[in-house]
Amino acid sequence: MDIAYHYILQDLGNKWRNNRIRLWNVGFKVEKSREENITNHPPHIPPEQWAMFIDYRLRPDTQKICKINTINKRKHETPHTGGSKKNSIRKEEMEKIKAIEATGPVPAKASRTDSLSQVLGPEHPGRTRTMGAGVAPTQVFGFSSCHGNHSSSCSTGSLSLEEVLHQVQTQLREERAHRMNVEAVLAHVLSQTGIILPPELALSNQPPYQNQASSHSSTHNDS
């Protein structure tokens, strides 16, 4: 799967999920009735949409799914740490990594069984350490049927971190160029229709079409 495309979809999904959770935790008051919560809707959300959101969250099947997700989240075996680690923990991890690397040659390519993975644990699905979200472990280490075997055949399909990083940078540049072209076309359409976007939806960059449209307009007025 295209790395940049997967990254964008995953990032949008995370932002959408986090925003829904934040809206519910901040905007909904358990001690108030449904009607009172609808009346006290967030200023940027129409009351009818807020009512639909409240009804969805209060549905029995939605409540059941939330409870199941909470239980499943507690069963995750992959260790995670929120925020920065203490220096004492970092020092202990570095000493373990050095001890493992001192027992044999350090592989040129990253693998699921290298010193970093042995000390910090398995990778989180959908992201790879030092590479962020969107780069899955299979894209770095490749697919393997060895399941933890230390033989050299397990890493034959893997890519070096430098190769994967180069691919990610290239695809992100292409995605940025495509986005700028789309924004340029959108700015041209908006300039022709006279529609003004609100500040929160404003384009990130001023596209060339916008400059061209303004220059054509000024030339026309001068004539």
Image (cartoon, rainbow, N blue to C red):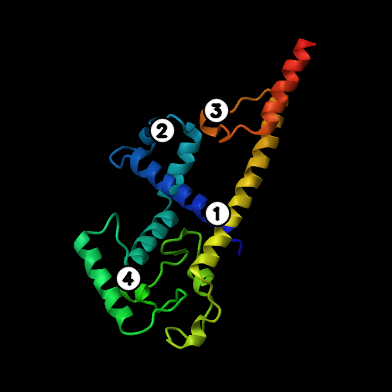
In this view of the protein, which residue sits in the foreground, 39 or 91? 91
Q: Which residue is mark 3?
A: 198
Q: Which residue is mark 1?
A: 9
Label 1 neighbourhood size at 10 Å, few (<14), some (14-19), many (20+)?
A: few
- Tell me if 26 is positioned left or right of 180 in this view: left
Classify 107 as above or below 3. below
Q: Which residue is mark 2?
A: 41
* Numbered badge on residue 109: none
Label 2 neighbourhood size at 10 Å, few (<14), some (14-19), many (20+)?
A: some
The quarter of the image holding the N terminus is bottom right
- Tell me if 120 is positioned left or right of 218 in this view: left
Classify 5 as above or below 50. below
Q: What is the secondary structure assignment of the residue under circle 4? A: helix
Question: First in sequence: mark 4 or mark 2?
Answer: 2
Q: Inspect the image, locate mark 3, and give the three-letter code of the amino acid beneath it.
A: Pro
**Label 4 – label 2 distance at C-alpha:** 44 Å
Look at discs 4 and 1 and give the one toward the viewer.
4
